[in-house]
Amino acid sequence: MSARVLRVEDLTVEFTAPGGPLRAVDEVSFELAEGEVLGLVGESGSGKTLTCRALIRLLPSRRARITRGVVRVDGLDLMTLPESAMQRVRGERIGMIFQNPMTHLDPIMTIGEQIGESLRFHKSITRRDAVAHAIELLRQVGIPDPALCSQSYPHSLSGGMRQRAMIAIALAGEPRILIADEPTTALDVTVQAQILRLLLDLRDRAGLSIILITHNLGVVAETCETVAVMYAGRIIERAAKRALLRRPLHPYSQGLIRSQPGAGPPLAELPSIPGQPPSLADLPQGCRFHPRCAYVIPRCREIRPPLADAGAGRRSACLRWQELACPS
Amino acid sequence: MTALLEVQDLTVHYPLPFGIGEIMTRSPRRVVQAVSGVNLRLERGETLGLVGESGCGKSSLGRAILRLTEAKSGRVLFDGTDVLALDKAGLFAFRKRAQMVFQEPHASLNPRLTVARTLAEVLRVHRVCPRAAIEARVPELLEAVGLSADLGARRPAALSGGQCQRVAIARALAMGPELLISDESVSALDVSIQAQILNLFMRLKREMDLTMMFISHDLSVVRHVCHRVAVMYLGRIVEHGPTEQIFRDPKHPYTQALLRAIPRMDPDAEPPAAAAASEPPSPVALSAGCVFHSRCPQAMDVCRGPPAPALRRSDQAEVACHLYPV
Amino acid sequence: MRTGERLAGGPSSLGLAARFDLGELPLPLLIGAGMVLFWSALALFADVIAPFDPNAADYNAALVPPNAAHWLGTDNFGRDVLSRVIHGTRVDLQMGIIGVLCPFVLGTVLGSIAGYFGGAIDTVLMRVVDVTIAFPFLVLMIAIITVLEPGLTSFYVAVTLVGWVSYARLVRAQTLVLKSSDFVLAARSLGYGHVRIMFRHILPNALIPSIVFSMSDVVLVILAGSAISYLGLGVQPPTAEWGVMIAEGQNFMTTAWWITTVPGLAIVFLALGFSFLADGLGEKLGVRE
């Protein structure tokens, strides 16, 4: 069993609102082993992006607060560090790349300058060394002409190149953990495959551990080893990829997998999950999925199902997971 | 019987703004060659999928067909009449018969109007039913797309993405069109909602006997709902034919690369192999010859020079590739 | 942008305020509305509220500091300052509102036509805007009023000819953006004509920034009106108007400070009220944070 590089316990994020605090992330716990690729899956509103931003304490607005939780990296609890220490953690221990590279790259700085900025901040090297180092990083992320790219501005690069550039910037501080927030969603399918291949290569070469946030189960199937599925701010299932896709142990995961076109015969009606995800201001009691669930029983409305051990390293937050395991 | 829709040699160019250098040297205006000489046929009752990556021209093609964008040349024959030559009255009548649903759910609805008003406006402008009956008809429309009638009083901001798309569909179908074009209308939705909307499309198509064109970059969606598929690359159709044929036995190297790159939700899936190198060139200065030759692993000398390969039959599909005999 | 990328979900997911049909009014909006209502009430019921006739001169009681009989003192003609301020509200409020409404309408019409049709119309209009903006607005207004005869009507003409440009630019910018939005494209695909699209789809959305701006513009117009009246080119004495009052009380600043200070404070508080209203409205309509 590889060493554990990240451990999240009971992470909770709340938004202050006129009617009372809204829990957008509710006691989320998971671990990341060295060299592991963990897929964090969920639809919009599930809290997957917010969870990862809370990890590195980069919350989107002043109304969001982390009210609970422990995040352990290299023996440190990130929640207890002062902001100055967190600035070192971001980029040197945990890096992050985002969905739309164009909005996350500074339009008036060249790529080389942006990588250099990160290098000089995290590694205190000279400007000249930073230039050379930046070109080397760009080469490592598979850019064909690194020197030219280093002198280019973001707008003159294609989508795939920008994403590679963003990966280079994120890796400048040599973090061991990389959070990739839907890195390929805005890219064409052919470019998507290249970027995912790149992330896996980096994992192999540099021992990077990756949290891959995505809503695409195909991407999960091809790149992740373990998967955590989120719904309405909670992790409702966690398992190895193969096990989850073969036999999901939560009605939501099951519904998600079945509603993918391609799972069944063409032109037939797609099995779909009725209804829609709940509003944060109006969360259901007990299990948050129960209003849309085909397996609901009265107990589901009363108690909040814990993320229970479902054997073989799997976890499921469904009271009836055993019945899902052995369909009649 | 004539096809419901027949596109002949359609070309759409978008002019780029003049740069100082160009004005000085009196260079011809640069254009984005969004669609180049496309031919397409859509039979009644069929669902045709139009796939391709960003910049391939599929949205431009869809909009040019409905005359929402001006085409440079070509003809669009809808039920025998050339849409591009219609006068104002003819165009108004055409709009009743051919409609579109757009990609961004919230953006395609007027944020200041309630849902009921949006739908009522369509009914009123096109005189679908007598004025007095409009108020009763709106809830019927909402229910037909799976929404409860009381959502009529809400504005788009208070609706979810899936609900907005349903309203957009209701709006498009309010006057009973024969042709419905979906321009990436499920791409911005979550997977579970996407399934609901796809089911809705399929049900309404059956009930209203629609002919559909499904524009999407998501091949698995297209595979599920379409009878036939056309693959576009940089403004040209490179391959088209029956859905299963295209997916099981893709002929064009680009189609093959595209299918290989789709992430498969297979429990035993392996990480993606090194995929097609590089990225599509810019659609501004297209080279003569095959549009794909610069990235094609099987490119031959003949592919580089003009003319671009024409579509030719191969099995039940048509492919625009020199690899296959004319 | 996926709706989930903002806070933790789409609009209905949070169900929070800042939407037209639900919830909480922002505090600035309430304060501003309250203040404006207060001044409006003063203006409407001036005859009833004011203790004295604003033009009634009482030479025996000239330059009297605030006391029990005259709460805010009297001016050099013995007129009650409080009553004059209350009656002045009528004039200043009217100046502010009409002085904003006329440029608003003119600017909106021209700006939306320029934005929607583009081409030569747009180019010509934008050059006219550029020329107008190049002049300091007060100088231009004074020039216009001097040509016509000094008075309130001339003031309205001047402020319209000078003030329309801001609205034209705002509306034109919004129209340009909205013209290429999906719902306008949808309206075109539904066969709607230009007129319907312009009035029902574009303008209602394009006007929002202008409406918010107009609230702050009221402040500027009132100040301009007071300045013009102070210079003797607007409202003519003996009409009670705050700018006029300030001008009249200038000579007595050191001896009878209340004659200039009270109308000055009135201007400040009316302006503040509209300012809060602008902020609150902006917040409510989603224009400001």
Image (cartoon, coloured by chain):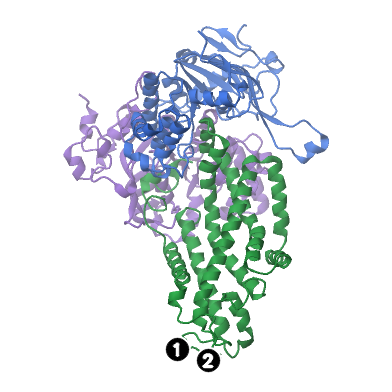
Q: Chain of mark 2?
A: C
User: At which x and y percent is residue A208?
Assistant: 47, 41
Residue contact between numbered discs 1 and 2, judged by CB atoms under 8 Å: yes
Using the image, determine if residue B79 lies above or below residue A317.
above
Say which quarter of the image contains residue C146.
Answer: bottom right
Q: Amino acid at mark 1?
A: Ala
In the foreground, B202 or A199? B202
Most extreme residue toward the right is B25
Using the image, determine if residue C19 lies above or below residue C264.
above
Rendered shade, chain C: green
Most extreme residue toward the left is A298
User: At which x and y percent is residue C185?
Assistant: 54, 35
- Ranked by sequence position, the earlier of labels 1 and 2 is 2
Say which quarter of the image contains residue A319.
Answer: top left
Rendered shade, chain B: blue
Q: Which residue is mark 2?
A: C61
Q: Which residue is mark 1?
A: C69
The residue under the point 57% across, 20% down is B254
